[in-house]
Amino acid sequence: MEYYYHINIFYSKDDEGYIADIPDLKYCSAFGNTPQEALEEVLKAKQAWLEVCRTSGKQIPEARYCPVIYKAA
């Protein structure tokens, strides 16, 4: 089953670049010099994160995170 997880992308002044994270996947995040690069890197991290779950027999979390802005629409 393929889950479509919400991805946050934001600029980090401290890191001087963009951070992308997937709230439903604990500690799944990545850095990029551009928003597109951060997205590409977090998608790689997501695949690795899910592969570890599959090979270790851990349950893959359902996609649940939904920012309030989407609930208000």
Image (cartoon, helix red, strand yellow):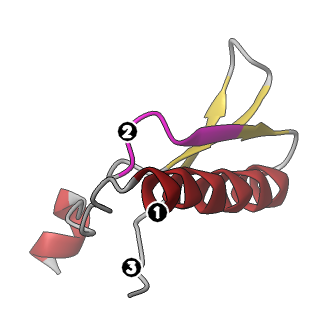
Q: Could you tell me which residue is drawn at 27 percent across and 59 percent down?
A: 59
* Cα distance in 3D space between marks 1 and 2: 15 Å
Mark 1 or 3 closer to N-term?
A: 3
Q: Could you tell me which residue is drawn at 69 percent across and 19 percent down?
A: 13
- Image: 47 above or below 34: below
Residue tagged by mark 1?
54
- Residue 28 within the segment the image draws in magenta: yes
The residue sitting at the top extreme is 14
Residue closer to the observer: 51 or 28: 51
How far from the left and from the top, in percent, is residue 16? 80, 22
Q: Could you tell me which residue is drawn at 74 percent across and 17 percent down?
A: 15
How far from the left and from the top, in percent, is residue 71? 13, 72
Q: Quadrant of the N terminus?
A: bottom left
* Cα distance in 3D space between marks 2 and 3: 15 Å
Q: Quadrant of the C terminus?
A: bottom left
Element type at mark 3 = loop
Residue closer to the observer: 55 or 47: 55
The residue sitting at the bottom extreme is 1
Tell me which amino acid carries mark 2: Lys
Residue tagged by mark 3?
3
Tell me which amino acid carries mark 3: Tyr
Residue closer to the observer: 33 or 21: 21
Residues rendered magenta in the picture: 25-30
- Asked if labels 3 and 2 touch by Cβ distance under 8 angstroms, the answer is no
